[in-house]
Image (tube, helix red, strand yellow):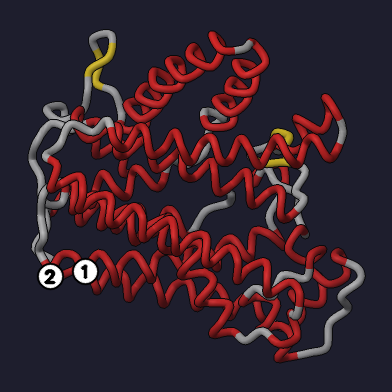
Amino acid sequence: MANNTLEGNRRHIPRQTGRTTTLVDAIEGTLADFLAARIAALDATDPELGGFARTARDLVLAGGKRLRPTFAYWGWRGVSDEPVEPVLPALAALELMHTFALVHDDVMDESATRRGRPTAHRIFASRHGERFGTSAAILVGDLCLVWADQLLARTPIPTATLFAVRARYDRMRVEAISGQYLDVLGETSPGDWSEDRALLVARLKTASYTVQRPLQLGLALAGSDSPEIDLAYENFGALVGEAFQLRDDLLGVFGDPAVTGKPAGDDLRTGKPTTLLLLARRHAPLTLDDPERLAQEIAATGAPAQVEAMIRERVASAIAALAAAPIAAEARHALIELAVRATHRPA
């Protein structure tokens, strides 16, 4: 796995209590230190705000794959041989933005669990009711987005480099929000949706802020403006990100909730026009009022096998897109490994 590669790169990873940490350890530590200071500041204003901030912190630190900072790291390492400590704030900021997106997504999808735990709106609803839960969760997401900006700004890099990083970061945020809007819109008229539009949603909502822009943000962090590497990261990221979303589509219907940490069938319950559902509809009429029966009907159409083939094709094309890029061999190897791991996962 990519983090095993990191453990062998002792010069570049922060040390902790006499041992070499992984990148994920370093990200977790950066987030924990930053959030402790933010909580203390809000606690001093009002203890209720401190509690609010602690809930946000718990959501941020509740696990997860930390894929976004990992892709950004290897985008940076592809052209940089410098120690990683100075860029950790920028890498960790991606996890705060990710929490913002997850919390708001869970509100919109009315999801009950995330990573095997109650979602933010459920946590707050258990205290003061559903309306309060929804309102407080939206505010938690907003707070995480502000915190992401604050942490990114703490990265000790030249101003011109920070502006270049910020340009990628802002583009990523606009694309993620745009993709989420189209995702919500699709639920209002799923019969009018096309497979091409479902893939556009995947590119905007998932590929952009999971793989594509983090890679390019990492390149900018290194102070590089190589058009050749930027294009390779653009193409690789779009393909791997689409494959990542296609895997999510499959897991959303056929995944084991005990492994995914999320209820199965949420997409079917809301009628979300995923690529999987649209391919299945092309083959047979579907029963839309019973998620369990619908999952069986989708399986019978052969659409899951088609989606699996689409995933394999995208990963193969992504690897080819990266093959000639003038980046460090270690980074190329790690990114290929990440691409496979991110798109062939049980959760």
Is residue 212 at least partly visible in the picture? yes
Q: Quadrant of residue 2?
A: top left
Q: Residue at x 22, y 54 (%)?
A: 333
Residue 117 percent across, percent down from the top left: 70, 33
Q: Quadrant of the N terminus?
A: top left
Report whether 128 appears left or right of 9. Answer: right
- For the point 68% across and 75% down, which residue is it? 186
**Image quarter of residue 108:** bottom right
Under mark 1, the amino acid is Ala
Disc 2 marks a residue whose amino acid type is Glu
Q: Which residue is mark 1?
A: 232
Q: Is residue 335 visible?
A: no
* Residue in view at x 58 percent, y 25 percent: 58
According to the image, label 2 marks what residue?
Answer: 228
Vertical placement of 265 versus 315: above or below?
above
Determine whether 55 is above or below 266 in the image. above
Residue 163 has which mark?
A: none
Q: Is residue 101 above or below residue 237?
A: above
Q: Secondary structure at mark 1?
A: helix
Q: Is residue 10 left or right of residue 102?
A: left
Badge 2, how many Cα within 10 Å: few under 14, some, many 20+?
A: few
Q: Residue furthest front?
A: 45
| Residue 19, percent from left and from top | 25, 15
Q: Is residue 326 left or right of residue 280?
A: left
- Secondary structure under tag 2 reads helix
Q: CA distance from mark 2 to mark 1?
A: 6 Å
Q: Residue at x 63, y 65 (%)?
A: 250
Q: How many marks?
A: 2
Q: Residues within 10 Å of mark 1 (few under 14, many from 20)?
A: many
For the residue pair 146 and 226, the one nearer the viewer reads as 146
Is the C-beta separation of discs 2 and 1 under 8 Å? yes
Percent position of residue 176, x then y? 48, 60
